[in-house]
Image: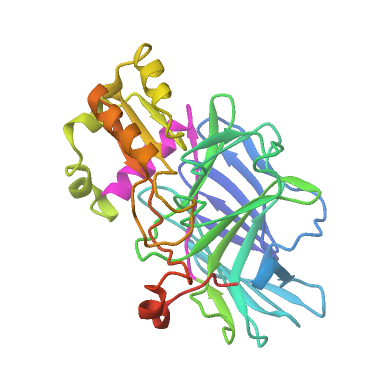
């Protein structure tokens, strides 16, 4: 159920209660655990809706600069918040999924100034004891004040490895995800200067962005849960496996893969490591990522893949002991100094910035 009163929107689903004020999520309560997870009671200088340009330069679309914010109710399950000021125009569509009881947020924005990289919706006032659980570095569970993630920005898919973030309390929490199966680019910000307990959810435009005027369209889903972070993560995994038909890929895994109990990243090509480790663990349950195996220096002269003598001895000994070894490959790089570059330079791509 969605109700509108002035500039405010009240949402109640089977699992949660939420309140929006001028684009901000100012209140989020779980009906499952009777806990508040978001509470924003005072003025915030960070706009709810922003246009982001190259270099993460951001401009708010709010009541500043002769701005205006209006709320429109279309039904008891759909409402819109419309923004306009000198920086641009924006819309946040708010609805509910009747099956999952997710709160659905779909921000978008437009400007007459070209170079729009993304549209960002900010969530402020997140409860300070909640930890961030997110697919960075194959998974982290950290306080938002931790130096690894404090005031950081993570782009999908290279750094933010899946469109999911979980805010975990002692025995409950809330989570945000998107069900994007069209490979839309997105980004997640953890904290802002002076606002550690906040998130920024971005929908990015397709590059090149030099003449681009708009961004948006991804639908962010918010819901609550009881238990550990594994509860929402499992729900997301089920959707992901079906949406991308990952069962087919999963079935291609070798039998030994399911027995792996230890993984080593960035392992030096030192045979002594293999011998020493084999006295502590079963090598057949260990997978090793080997970065410096080529005759060229690391990350240079791609796509030249010639095995150096040290790595050759390491791999030979590893196979004798039963280890599983993965040589490092950079899947999308060609060194401009390599002769191959002249054949493919017409098809090169660069970072959107």
Q: Is residue 71 left or right of residue 279?
A: right
Q: Is residue 296 visible?
A: yes
Q: Residue at x 28, y 55 (%)?
A: 244
- Residue 325 percent coordinates (x, y): 31, 36
The single residue placed furthest to the front in the displayed view is 309
Residue 260 point in image, percent of width and height: 30, 27
Q: Is residue 222 magenta?
A: yes
Give the residue displayed 52% in from the left and 80% down from the top: 208
Q: Position of residue 159 (x, y in %)?
A: 52, 52
Q: Is residue 53 visible?
A: no
Q: Which one is in front, 165 or 264?
A: 264
Residue 40 screen position, x and y as percent: 74, 48
Say which quarter of the image contains residue 20.
Answer: bottom right
| Residue occupying image coordinates x 41% and y 50% | 295
User: Does 287 sit above or below residue 217?
Assistant: above
Q: Is residue 273 above or below residue 57?
A: above
Q: Is residue 312 magenta?
A: no
Furthest toward the top, the residue is 279
For the record, the magenta segment spans 217-241
How many dots with numbers?
A: 0
Considering the image in quadrants, where does the C terminus appear?
bottom right
The chosen color scheme is rainbow
């Amino acid at each position: 159920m969605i109700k509108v009163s002035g500039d405010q929107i009240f949402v109640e689903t089977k699992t949660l209660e939420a309140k929006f004020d001028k684009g901000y999520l100012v209140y989020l309560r779980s009906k499952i655990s009777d806990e508040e997870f978001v509470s924003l009671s005072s003025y915030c200088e960070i706009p709810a809706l922003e246009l982001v340009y190259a270099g993460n330069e951001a401009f708010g679309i709010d009541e500043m600069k002769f701005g205006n914010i209006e709320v429109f109710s279309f039904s008891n399950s759909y409402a819109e918040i419309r923004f306009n000021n000198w920086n641009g125009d924006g819309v946040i569509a708010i609805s509910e999924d009747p099956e999952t009881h997710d709160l659905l947020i779909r921000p978008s924005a437009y400007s007459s100034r070209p170079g729009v990289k993304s549209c960002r919706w900010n969530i402020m006032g997140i409860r300070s004891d909640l930890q961030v659980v997110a697919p960075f570095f194959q998974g982290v569970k950290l306080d938002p004040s931790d130096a690894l993630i404090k005031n950081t920005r993570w782009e999908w898919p290279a750094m933010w490895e899946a469109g999911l973030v979980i805010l975990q309390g002692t025995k409950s929490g809330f989570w945000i995800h998107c069900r994007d199966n069209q490979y839309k680019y997105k980004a997640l910000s953890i904290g802002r200067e002076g606002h550690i307990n906040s998130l920024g959810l971005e929908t990015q435009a397709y590059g090149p962005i030099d003449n681009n005027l708009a961004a948006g369209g991804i639908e962010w889903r918010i819901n609550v849960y009881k238990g550990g972070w594994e509860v929402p993560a499992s729900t997301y995994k089920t959707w992901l496996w079906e949406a991308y038909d990952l069962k087919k890929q999963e079935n291609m895994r070798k039998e030994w893969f399911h027995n792996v109990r230890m993984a080593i990243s960035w392992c030096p090509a030192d045979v002594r490591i293999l011998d020493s480790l084999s006295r502590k663990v079963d090598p057949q349950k260990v997978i090793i990522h080997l970065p410096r195996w080529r005759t060229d220096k690391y990350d240079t002269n791609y796509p030249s893949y010639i095995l150096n003598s040290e790595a050759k001895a390491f791999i030979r000994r590893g196979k004798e002991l039963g280890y599983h070894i993965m040589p490092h490959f950079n899947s999308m790089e060609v060194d401009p100094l390599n002769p191959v570059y002249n054949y493919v330079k017409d098809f090169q791509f660069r970072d959107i910035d």
